[in-house]
């Protein structure tokens, strides 16, 4: 699993702890090592001491022995001379050569010039295990320090002064990071202590609030299983890489936050579902006083590291857990930022958590980022797509696989369709079937049935329609009070983007629809089954106005899914067909 | 997967063009999926085919077989190979498309070997019966920058914790033939008549010889599959030199970049074993060492990877 610490990290932390204990008894070393390595599947190593012929099971214990018993601090010399990998190899061979020749080696006396000779690249010992595990040794305190120290002979006094200043800045940075790290550890511990009494339930995850609603218990168990899977799915790198590299998405958040620094300066911000921490770091850079980043997924451990390595640990506090369960260090926040959108906007059902947090924590005049969302639907016709994805099954290497077609019409397909597949009369006539002002939307608003209409373009008859395409637009306004004409069912994200006045004012929007750059959300394709396509084929070719009702329903047993039911037929007539698509 | 032309067509040719081998034989299709291989076997004249799959796809497969009028020739069983009741005590031929990424990741080979040991008649045939993994060095600077370097600067932030993870995860992707700098070297050859599950943990030293002066950022691995029982042997490759397959190739980025000159050898070794905690994951270790007269280009390293 990507979230598991890498072997190198483990090696680093274990060496950190073992170097603090001074050990005189070899048996203790062996015991400690056996305990520590039980669950590790590394093959047994035989690391020969640098100063004598004693053999150790790992490099860390060998180097600790050399340092503590013989005053030869290998890592210290390496860092003092700012040696890279090859330099370190030379250092090993230099020491081994000296020892071999019976010359006493003092770490403090070794200079860079001693290691100049390339013959020290050649191992003195065959299969020297120390060389093999060089990469596992703790790294120098900072790469910049190493880089600065790499050319000491070129530096005059100025260079040294500058280096000194750099090191001092680095020290401050580290001190800051450490203090914020200590704070985070403290908070985590406090939280665990608080959990312990209430957490009589399984896994110590139980919270006061859970205990307060035992009536939901059965439903809770089912929902929890699905959610466990949901949060786990966000533990891996790949999904975050896809999201971060979705420039439509990430640029929109960045642009809004950086172009509206006045909104963030000095404010307390809550980031729900923070992932790798990118939005929290945008807010911190924009001047937020405090950012609280919450995520239930294991990825938050990486977010924490990212935040520290970017020196923002004193501004951003990470909390692992569901937003409904964690204890925030503040009573209210000025801004909630979250990237909660799923396929067809509401798949994943993360918005209810944002709404819950809004009602619980957002200050009376606080801002939600993004602030508005609208959902759109248009009829599509794309014969090539249908042939490639549906017709395909009727002749697979000479076999008829019709049964494979069936499920195709039952599910909403996340896919990117070309703009040319959209067969309505165009922008001017199109209306969003749902507009959500996220400051006031309630959970009840997310389950709805609402009329929709479309006018087919001149080239398309109802008989040509293969299905419907659902997408959403997101809007980032600077205040919860926007003029009524700024966002409505006829407003598209691309309208905002095309309007220089809005752009200059720092208003940001993006679309996931077929007229914009494709995003990782793609669009939701609802394909009509044969029966319904035949029904539509009977509609008079002159009838350009079609419509019906679209419903978003939460399916039984899939709390994070969405069922989309669409009825359709000629406008103004009762003769409607319907079909339901699942998004699980 | 059915749209993977190289894969499906190779199986089709191996089976349908060898009617003399399949005529009146009892065939077992391990991990039958939509039953396409089972139906090929019927077309080739098999007396009966048993298709086994754990997935619920088997219910669709039954309908497909019915639609194609082969229900009396194909018996489809849902379950684990190890747990099902086989309607025949022995089979003459085992067919299976068991290969995973890097041949072995999430592969069904252990199931095929179980079926072989329990059900294959003496002198029975296995389709395919030979698999070989190859490795070569590639120049991949641009893409390494995009996949690995990306984490150095994410919208102005340092994301190095994710870089470490990215380096330790082999990347399944297509590699352009032009990127290949060295001759390929085989690191594992499996003879499906003889191999055992113990062979899936292996260690292999090998040399990569540079074909031209270039940089090497990564090693790429792929596999070839052979049906040697055929009248005219049929094989297909998933390498960068040939047509796309859904297996693509597997790229292992090295921490360092090597600079090689034509004719130079990189001494390498590859160790693979299933993870002890999760057998489906693979732990892979690659060691490399470049010996040259030019000491500035000497390079050596060990990289650990986990396919999960």
Image: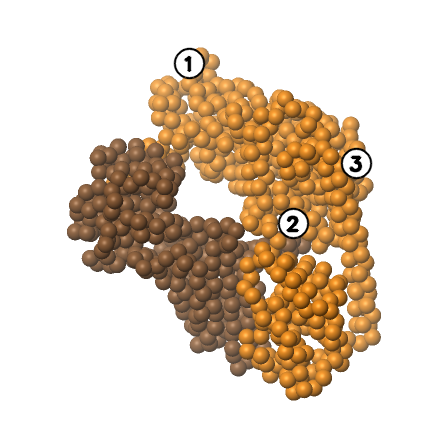
Chain colours: A orange, B brown
Q: Nearer the viewer, residue B82 or A436?
A: B82
Residue drawn at point x = 71 percent, y = 46 percent: A281
Residue drawn at point x = 30 percent, y = 37 percent: B76
Residue drawn at point x = 40 percent, y = 31 percent: A407
Q: Residues within 10 Å of mark 2 (few under 14, many from 20)?
A: many
Is label 1 on the same chain as label 2?
yes
Of the residues under marks 2 and 3, which one precedes in the sequence?
A: 2
Q: Residues within 10 Å of mark 3 (few under 14, many from 20)?
A: few
Q: Nearer the viewer, residue A300 or B114?
A: B114
Residue B81 percent across, percent down from the top left: 35, 44
Residue A50 percent across, percent down from the top left: 66, 77
Tag 2 residue: A302
Q: Residues within 10 Å of mark 1 (few under 14, many from 20)?
A: few
Is label 2 on the same chain as label 3?
yes
Q: Are marks 1 and 2 in contact (CB under 8 Å)?
A: no
Tag 3 residue: A330
């Amino acid at each position: 699993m990507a979230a598991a610490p890498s072997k190198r990290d483990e090696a680093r932390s274990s060496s950190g702890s073992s170097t603090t204990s001074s050990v005189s008894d070899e048996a203790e070393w062996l015991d400690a090592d056996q305990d520590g390595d039980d669950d590790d599947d590394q093959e047994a190593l035989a690391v020969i001491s640098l100063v004598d012929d004693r053999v150790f099971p790992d490099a860390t214990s060998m180097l600790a022995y050399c340092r503590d018993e013989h005053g030869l601090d290998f890592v210290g010399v390496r860092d003092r001379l700012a040696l890279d990998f090859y330099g370190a190899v030379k250092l090993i061979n230099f020491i081994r050569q000296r020892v071999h020749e019976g010359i006493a080696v003092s770490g403090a006396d070794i200079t860079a010039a001693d290691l100049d000779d390339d013959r020290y690249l050649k191992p003195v010992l065959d299969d020297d295990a120390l060389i093999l595990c060089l990469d596992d040794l703790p790294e120098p305190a900072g790469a910049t320090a190493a880089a600065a120290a790499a050319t000491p002979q070129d530096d005059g006094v100025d260079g040294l002064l500058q280096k000194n200043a750099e090191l001092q800045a680095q020290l401050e940075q580290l001190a800051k990071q450490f203090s914020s790290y200590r704070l985070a550890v403290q908070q985590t511990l406090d939280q665990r202590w608080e959990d312990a009494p209430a957490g009589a339930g399984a896994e110590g995850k139980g919270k006061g609030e859970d205990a307060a609603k035992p009536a939901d218990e059965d439903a809770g168990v089912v929902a929890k299983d699905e959610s466990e899977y949901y949060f786990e799915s966000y533990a891996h790198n790949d999904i975050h890489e896809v999201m971060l590299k979705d420039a439509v998405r990430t640029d929109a958040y960045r642009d809004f936050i950086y172009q509206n620094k006045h909104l963030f300066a000095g404010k307390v911000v809550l980031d729900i579902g923070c992932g790798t921490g990118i939005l929290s770091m945008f807010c911190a850079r924009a001047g937020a006083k405090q950012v609280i980043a919450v995520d239930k997924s294991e990825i938050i451990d990486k977010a924490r590291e990212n935040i520290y390595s970017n020196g923002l640990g004193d501004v951003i506090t990470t909390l692992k857990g569901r937003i409904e369960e964690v204890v925030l260090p503040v009573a209210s926040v000025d801004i909630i930022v979250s990237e909660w959108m799923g396929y067809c906007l509401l798949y994943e059902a993360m918005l209810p958590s944002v709404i819950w947090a809004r009602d619980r924590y957002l200050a009376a005049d606080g801002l939600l980022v993004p602030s508005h969302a609208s959902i759109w639907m248009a009829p599509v016709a794309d014969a090539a797509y249908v042939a490639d994805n549906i017709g395909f099954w009727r002749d697979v290497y000479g076999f008829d696989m019709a049964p494979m077609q069936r499920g195709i019409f039952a599910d909403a397909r996340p896919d990117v369709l070309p703009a040319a597949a959209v067969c309505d009369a165009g922008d001017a006539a199109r209306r969003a079937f749902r507009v959500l002002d996220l400051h006031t939307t309630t959970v009840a608003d997310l389950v709805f049935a609402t009329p929709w209409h479309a006018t087919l373009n001149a080239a398309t008859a109802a008989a040509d329609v293969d299905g419907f395409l659902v997408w959403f637009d997101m809007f980032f306004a600077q205040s919860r009070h926007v003029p009524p004409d700024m966002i409505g069912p006829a407003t598209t994200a691309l309208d905002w983007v095309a309007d220089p006045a809005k752009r200059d004012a720092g208003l940001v929007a993006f679309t996931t629809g077929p007229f914009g750059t494709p995003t990782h959300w793609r669009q939701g394709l609802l394909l009509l089954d044969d029966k319904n396509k035949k029904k539509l084929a009977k509609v008079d070719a002159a009838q350009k106005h079609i419509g019906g009702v679209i419903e978003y329903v939460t399916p039984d047993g899939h709390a994070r899914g969405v069922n989309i039911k669409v009825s359709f037929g000629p406008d103004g007539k009762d003769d409607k067909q319907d079909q339901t698509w699942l998004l699980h | 997967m059915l749209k993977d032309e190289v894969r499906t067509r190779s199986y089709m040719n191996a089976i349908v063009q060898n009617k003399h081998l399949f005529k009146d034989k009892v065939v077992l299709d391990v991990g039958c999926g939509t039953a396409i291989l089972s139906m090929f076997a019927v077309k080739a004249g098999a007396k009966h085919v048993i298709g086994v799959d754990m997935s619920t796809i088997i219910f669709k497969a039954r309908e497909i077989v019915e639609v194609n009028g082969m229900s009396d020739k194909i018996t489809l069983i849902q379950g684990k190979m190890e747990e099902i009741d086989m309607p025949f005590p022995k089979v003459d031929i085992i067919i299976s498309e068991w290969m995973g990424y890097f041949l072995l990741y999430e592969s069904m080979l252990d199931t095929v070997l179980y079926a072989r040991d329990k059900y294959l008649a003496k002198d029975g045939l296995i389709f395919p019966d030979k698999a070989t993994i190859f490795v070569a060095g590639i120049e991949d600077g641009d893409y390494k920058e995009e996949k690995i370097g990306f984490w150095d600067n994410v919208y102005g932030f340092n994301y190095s914790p994710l870089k470490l993870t990215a380096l330790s995860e082999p990347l399944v992707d297509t590699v352009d033939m032009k990127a290949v700098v060295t001759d390929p070297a085989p690191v594992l050859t499996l003879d499906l008549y003889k191999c055992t599950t113990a062979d899936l943990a292996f260690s292999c030293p090998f040399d990569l010889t540079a074909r031209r002066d270039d940089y090497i950022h990564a090693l790429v691995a792929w596999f070839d599959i052979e049906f040697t029982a055929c009248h005219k042997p049929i094989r297909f490759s998933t390498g960068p030199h040939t047509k796309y397959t859904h297996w693509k190739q597997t790229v292992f980025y090295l921490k360092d970049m090597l600079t090689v000159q034509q004719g130079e050898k990189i001494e390498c070794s590859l160790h693979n074993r299933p993870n002890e905690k999760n057998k489906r994951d693979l732990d892979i270790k690659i060691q490399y060492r470049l010996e040259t007269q030019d000491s500035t280009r000497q390079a050596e390293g060990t990289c650990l990877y986990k396919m999960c």
